[in-house]
Image: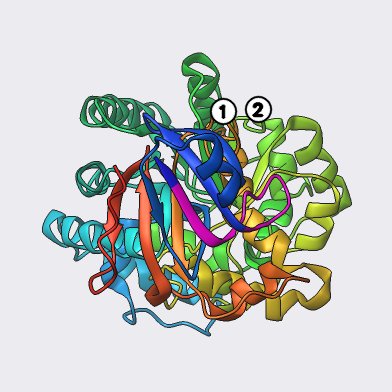
Amino acid sequence: MILTARLLLPISSPPIMDGGLLIRDGTICAVDKASALIRDFATEPHDDLGRAALLPGLVNAHTHLELTGLHGRLPLGKSFTEWAIAMLDLRSGLDDEFFSASARLGATTLLRSGVTCVADITTSGSSVAPLKAAGLRGIIFQEILGPHPEQATERLDAAEKALRSLQLQTDDSLLSVGLSPHAPYSLSESLLLRCAELLRRRRLPATIHVAESPEEVAYIGLGLGPIATTLLPAVGRHSPSHRVCGESPIALLDRAGLLSDRLTAVHGVHIGISDLQLLKQRGVALAVCPRSNHYLKVGTAPLPRCLAASLRVGLGTDSLASNETLSLWDEMRFAHRLYGEAVTAQQLVTMATLGGAAALGMVGTIGSFAPGKRADLTALAIDRVDDVDPYESLLDQASDDSVVLSMVEGKILYQREGTARWNCH
């Protein structure tokens, strides 16, 4: 099948006006001008998307779909600790039915917004079924928490049991599983060490919230601040469960053996030069969530510095407990306004596609249009294309509502109602 559009963004190579893809058995076989593909493969079925931009499917590098139903129910704009305590209180009253309904809504929302791959953190396991049913690609990370050292064995055993269940549920799908130690302040040092050993033994992907807030930096480095005096006492912990020695959250993770090329660090708002060097040396990827950081008033990640250091950087929305939408288009536009000329539209679109794929260890499979990669893609209706900067004009026009088609492995998973019924197959 040949699929063509007014604008093709391969990401790993220059944009192609009136470009197209040759797709066979779910694999991209050729990327070229539409006229060249139609000439060279004259017997192939051909669908033209018309005034559309065709690009690799978006990769949401960090979210919690089971929390989608919390939209508008938590205080945004207050301190991180106040938000976290409110989250603990609210979450204690939620049940499996809530988590399942939230995950279903979240999966549907992602698909309709052009996302074809997701890194989702779960405590309940409720996101597996809707993501599998939707046909999306991704990694489901089992979350683990435990600030009490004496509970480390019990918490790790429970996480391993949950991982086995997730692996059974993700059979015959494009989903894989990983482990998510929640954050350096919510796991005891002994549990962090045990998680690192499990990850090495099982060679699993991992993700962790780290260096998100000033409160976290103060607690890890000095054992002080609102996390020590308010947040952890709310769960029965009244003293630090890590060795307090003035180190940064990133340095603590390195000492625990968690930094590796299979880890995606999430947020990274408060990282210094030495932290950045550690992330680079260990091959750690980064997922940034600018709107969540803004709403929780924790600061702004040093994204230009991370990109300049050639870290693998993806873009995430976080959950609707700390954001307004699950739209990566909204995330890109916000980041573009936030960083201005320091981060270009092209860099942001790359983060939301190839960068996310690289962060999740899928760069050889998805994230760009190149022969041999899988045909995961999305198409958006556009009115105009700026020949000088097509990425900028795409961000100006793109929204969830402009997505007309999403495809994974060459199969249509979403097609907007009211659009032409393409014969893509």
For disc 1, the marked residue is 193
For disc 2, the marked residue is 257
Horizontal and vertical percent position of residue 9: 61, 55
Residue 267 in sight from this viewpoint: no
Query: At numbered mark 2, what does the secondary structure look like: helix, strand or loop?
Result: loop
Q: Residue at x 31, y 65 (%)?
A: 109
Q: Are marks 1 and 2 in contact (CB under 8 Å)?
A: yes
In this orientation, which residue lies closer to the viewer: 262 or 123? 262
Q: Residues within 10 Å of mark 1 (few under 14, many from 20)?
A: some
Residue 259 on the magenta segment: no
Q: Is residue 58 left or right of residue 371?
A: left
Q: Residue at x 37, y 37 (%)?
A: 409
Residue 201 in sight from this viewpoint: yes
Is residue 127 shown above or below 330?
Answer: above
Q: Is residue 285 left or right of residue 235?
A: right
Query: At numbered mark 1, what does the secondary structure look like: helix, strand or loop?
Result: helix
What amino acid does circle 1 point to?
Leu
Is residue 265 shown above or below 371?
Answer: below
What amino acid does circle 2 point to?
Gly
Q: Image quadrant for the N terminus?
A: top left
Q: Residue at x 58, y 50 (%)?
A: 35
Q: Is residue 418 left or right of residue 333?
A: left
Q: Is residue 89 left or right of residue 97?
A: right
Q: Which residues are magenta?
A: 3-17
Q: Which of the colour schemes (rainbow, by chain, secondary structure, one colour) is used?
A: rainbow
- Quadrant in which residue 55 is drawn: bottom right
- Quadrant in which residue 390 is drawn: bottom right
Q: Earlier in the sequence, mark 1 or mark 2?
A: 1
